[in-house]
Image: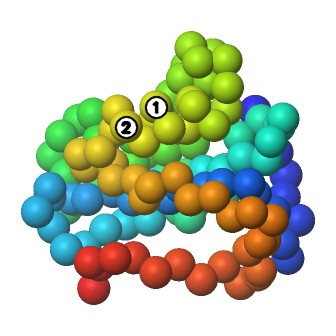
Amino acid sequence: MQQAIEPTEIALDAYTMCSFLPNLDSARAIPLVLIGYRQGEDPWFVWLVPKEGIDAKGLTDDPYYAKVLGDPRAYFVKKLNKYVEETGCVKRGIEMLVDCHQNHLAFTPLTELRETPFRHPLQVELVGAF
């Protein structure tokens, strides 16, 4: 389900970014992944954390989120596959992922790009993160 991407341009129809919030009232977020799609294609993942994940020590004591942070690739691919299979549509699957996971895993709204590709280097603004 993961596709290789050209490092200089990412052309998506829409995307959302998921960040981990150590505390629900936290002003700090740790960006994990950008999830997007092109019409008629599988979802695309742009990982913002190392392949081996990140150490949850000092971020969370919750074993569920520690597991997510330790292997975010497996977690997000599995969850999104489930929602895409359930809905039969990549866009709706991403929307379900966003709707169902808005606690410590905070998503930006699904943003339509209308053929405006990202350019490398990717610049990300985290609202409320300092």
- Residue 74 in which image quadrant: top right
Asked whether the beta carbons under mark 2 and mark 1 sit within 8 Å of each other, the answer is yes
Quarter of the image for the C terminus: give it. Answer: bottom left
Residue sitting nearer the eye, 37 or 54: 37
Mark 1, residue position:
96
Question: Is disc 2 placed on a helix, strand or loop?
Answer: helix
Q: Position of residue 7 (x, y in %)?
A: 83, 71
Figure check: 129 above or below 92: below
Say which residue appears at 40% left-offset and 53% top-offset: 107
Mark 2: amino acid:
Asp
Mark 2, residue position:
99
Quarter of the image for the N terminus: give it. Answer: top right
Figure check: 11 above or below 83: below
Figure check: 125 above or below 111: below
Figure check: 77 above or below 128: above
Q: Is residue 14 left or right of residue 3?
A: left
Mark 1: amino acid:
Met
Residue sitting nearer the eye, 70 or 101: 101
